[in-house]
Image (cartoon, rainbow, N blue to C red):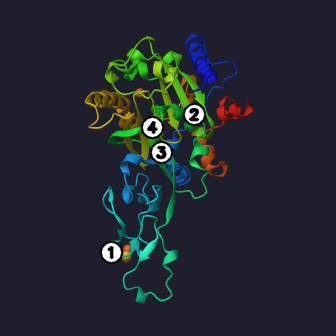
């Protein structure tokens, strides 16, 4: 992180602690319409224009250790196969045989020399080419070169591999923009996969996503945990293009060090902001990541149905050398799960509320402006034409969206 950004974030935290209200001219945020959480038509638009066209996290390089290694990924419904090729590159394809659609693999992960369909034996190589067809004589004028597996866009930030079902999507690194820059000091090329867990939650995905974009709730639901060491009144926020954002919250006691990570290897290049404070990135649309010198989770929010979702929590760590993950991680993960339980405790009841006539929309405070930023981006993705007044959010935050890359270019 450059010195100018460090100073800006420090000044931002000082300002937030001492202000008496929102900055002059900051707009009162219009309520988020309740229909966004329950309306079937809106849910369809959200699925087709946000989720099916977004860069989303699929897997870590450690899950594809050698040529022929594969991971089956279907968090958004479509079955997608990520394969490491002989050239070391990771490619993604639909796990869909070009003959009659049978799956090439059924296991979640493994390794194959060839991907042979279990239905009639068509075979594909690591690059998705159809190379053998049983009884080819019975397919006259057959051109195998036109029947390779259908590719899916697959690009990476260091060891993190993302997929996007939109062939026309902008390149991942262009989309990530300032997020990729912010991650650089955490060495995404060297970070290792440490632990994975997944939870089913009975609520619309946005009910829980909203909850992870603010620190306003710390004093209530995290009274015995996070609130003891973080001062939410000092939270400073950067809203970035493409819906991304960063939130930095100061430690209550500047000298405080987390005993839960004592002795763990650190990424040396991590700067003072992430060492002395809590940083939380929202990688649009669905990753919340608090990165630290000793590692980080990706907390990932996946829609399942209109009123159910999956929460994935994947931990990454600086290299811990040979052998298993250090024992202290067990406690670290257990402590974090306790915080996640605090965060998710109201979700099913909030879902009951949003489905009732008692839910009349969400009045957001200045502290909760990241949520509004997230929803504005959703409407940009859906496009004006698809939205009626009962569901859309009025765009008001454009003057507060910063483009750090543009600043760098101007320097
Ligand atoms: S469906 Fe794959 S070979 Fe027939
Ligand atoms: Fe929380």
Q: Position of residue 311 (x, y in %)?
A: 38, 41
Q: CA distance from mark 2 to mark 4?
A: 13 Å
Q: Residue at label 3?
A: 38
In the figure, residue 85 lies in which quadrant?
bottom left
Q: Position of residue 377 (x, y in %)?
A: 60, 41
Q: Residue at label 4?
A: 207
Identify the disc placed on residue 119. Answer: 1
Q: Residue at label 2?
A: 372
Decide: is 285 above or below 235: below
Ligand 2 is within 8 Å of the C-beta of the residue at disc 3: no
4 and 3 marks in contact (CB < 8 Å): no
1 and 4 marks in contact (CB < 8 Å): no
Q: Residues within 10 Å of mark 1 (few under 14, many from 20)?
A: few
2 and 4 marks in contact (CB < 8 Å): no
Q: Report if residue 358 is visible in the image.
A: no
Residue at 41% x, 75% y is: 100
**Element marked by disc 3:** helix
Q: Earlier in the sequence, mark 1 or mark 4?
A: 1
Q: Residues within 10 Å of mark 2 (few under 14, many from 20)?
A: many
In the figure, residue 182 lies in which quadrant?
top right
Decide: is 39 above or below 130: above
In the rendered image, the quadrant that contains the C terminus is top right
Q: CA distance from mark 1 to mark 2?
A: 48 Å
Of 216 and 66, the residue lying toward us: 66
């Amino acid at each position: 992180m450059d010195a100018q950004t460090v100073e800006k974030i420090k000044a931002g935290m000082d300002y937030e602690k001492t202000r008496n209200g929102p900055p002059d001219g900051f707009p009162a945020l219009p309520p988020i319409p309740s229909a966004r959480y329950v309306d079937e038509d809106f849910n369809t638009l959200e699925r087709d224009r946000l989720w099916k066209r977004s860069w989303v996290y699929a897997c870590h390089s450690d899950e594809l250790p050698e040529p022929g290694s594969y991971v089956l990924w279907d968090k958004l419904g479509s079955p997608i196969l990520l394969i490491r090729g002989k050239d070391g590159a990771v490619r993604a394809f639909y796990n869909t045989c070009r003959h009659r659609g049978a799956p090439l693999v059924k296991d979640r992960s493994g390794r194959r020399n060839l991907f042979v369909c279990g239905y009639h034996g068509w075979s594909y190589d690591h690059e998705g080419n159809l190379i053998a067809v049983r009884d080819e004589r019975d397919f006259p004028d057959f051109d195998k070169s036109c029947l390779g597996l259908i590719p899916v866009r697959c690009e990476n930030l260091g060891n993190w591999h993302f997929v996007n079902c939109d062939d026309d999507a902008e390149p991942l690194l262009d989309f990530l923009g300032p997020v990729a820059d912010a991650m650089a000091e955490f060495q995404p090329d060297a970070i290792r996969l440490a632990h994975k867990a997944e939870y089913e939650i009975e609520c619309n995905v946005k009910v829980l996503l909203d909850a992870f974009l603010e620190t306003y709730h710390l004093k209530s639901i995290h009274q015995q945990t996070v609130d003891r060491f973080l001062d939410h009144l000092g939270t400073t926020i950067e809203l970035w293009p493409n819906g991304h954002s960063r939130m930095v919250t100061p430690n209550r006691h500047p000298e405080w060090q987390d005993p839960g990570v004592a002795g763990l290897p650190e990424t040396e290049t991590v700067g003072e902001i992430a060492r002395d404070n809590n940083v939380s990135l929202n990688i649009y649309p669905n990753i919340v990541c608090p990165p630290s010198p000793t590692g980080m989770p990706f907390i990932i929010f996946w829609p399942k149905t209109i009123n159910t979702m999956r929460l994935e929590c994947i931990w990454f760590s600086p290299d811990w050398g040979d052998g298993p993950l250090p024992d202290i991680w067990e406690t670290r993960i257990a402590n974090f799960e306790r915080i996640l339980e605090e965060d998710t405790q109201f979700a099913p009841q909030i879902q009951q509320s949003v489905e009732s006539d008692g839910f009349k929309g969400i009045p957001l405070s200045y502290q909760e402006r990241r949520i509004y930023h997230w929803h504005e981006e959703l409407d940009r993705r859906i496009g004006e034409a698809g939205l009626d007044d009962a569901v859309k959010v009025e765009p008001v935050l454009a003057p507060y969206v910063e483009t750090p890359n543009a600043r760098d270019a101007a320097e």
